[in-house]
Image (cartoon, rainbow, N blue to C red):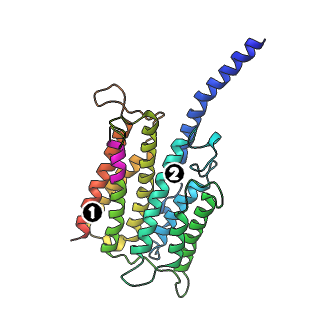
Amino acid sequence: MQKILVRTGVILVLAAFLIVPVMLHFAQKRHNQLPFAIAEVYPESEPIVNGEVFASVLAVLMEHELDSPTGWRPNDLFLWGPALWADNKANRQLGIIQAVRESTRVFRDNLTKVSATEYDSNLVDADTKFRNDEHKFWFPAAETRFDEGVAALRKYEAGLKTTPPTSKPINRRNVELIRLFTAWTDLLGGAHANLYKEEEAGSEGSSVSFWKTDDYFYHAQGFAHVMHHLLLAVQREYAAELHGRQTVLELMAQVSNSLERAASVKPLVVLDGSPAGLFANHRRNLDVYLVDARQLIFSIREELEK
């Protein structure tokens, strides 16, 4: 009887190690789809206040991560945290918060500010709250500060529609938009370095470990997720300025497509096969989309500088 119980226990443990990752895979695949369509919420037939679309998308991106059934992963306890089961989602969220931070910074410093004018107080608050330690479990928890950052963005949106407005709208100048694209290409450059490298820096020639491969993959994917949706917001915000600039519009559509593909790739297991091997190298596959997006963004910057 004791042997039967032991065997049953072993079988259940093995089953858990097989079933739980598959469940997490499909749950993550479903979660990766942001239930927010800019074309439906902000149709071109309806007027917008400069800044509301960009702020709204930033807020929705964070709300989606904070309000999901499993919530914010990077600061979870060890038994159900990024080091054991949930490292894929955790690393994706680390990429998301990094891209959100950089985009919010440019939103505050450039898109809504010109020269010696003052900063928008709500955007300052949002930027500050989003920079809270993403690994902090309490005093305060990362989720608490990030929720406050989202609330600041919602206050910014509301302030755009008061009479007189209490929030600073996007100025919609090309020179400031270029700053946003520069921040994004910098992030994508860092992602490319991690996705393409074969050896870990400072490790005396040791190859990238199996346990780090998926970390780099999902972290980079978090960048793509944020940039894809914010680029759609930029297209809506700058629709009047981009009208008739067919080259820029086509380039943006191509960037959006590459970023969307990068953000939606979800292998069951992230493999790191050799170039001539039988198995896929998912880091390199993802890198193709991100490098393509980065090069196209450089082309957009050149067009906007004309």
The quadrant of the picture occupied by the C terminus is: bottom left
Q: Position of residue 14 (x, y in %)?
A: 62, 24
Question: Which residue is labeled 1 in the image?
Answer: 300
> Is residue 25 rendered magenta in the image?
no
Q: Which residues are magenta?
A: 189-198
Query: Which structural element holds mark 1?
Result: helix
Q: Looking at the rendering, which quadrant does residue 272 occupy? A: top left
Q: In the displayed image of the protein, which residue is found farthest to the bottom?
A: 164
Residue 205 - label: none
Residue 44 in view, yes or no: no
Q: In the displayed image of the protein, which residue is found farthest to the right?
A: 1
Do tag 2 and tag 1 residues touch (Cβ < 8 Å)? no
Q: Amino acid at mark 1?
A: Ile
Query: Which structural element holds mark 2?
Result: helix
| Crowd band around label 2 with a 10 angstrom C-alpha radius: few (<14), some (14–19), many (20+) | many
Of residue 306 and residue 247, the one placed in the foreground of this image is: 306
Q: Position of residue 160 (x, y in %)?
A: 51, 79
C-alpha gap between disc 2 and disc 1: 27 Å
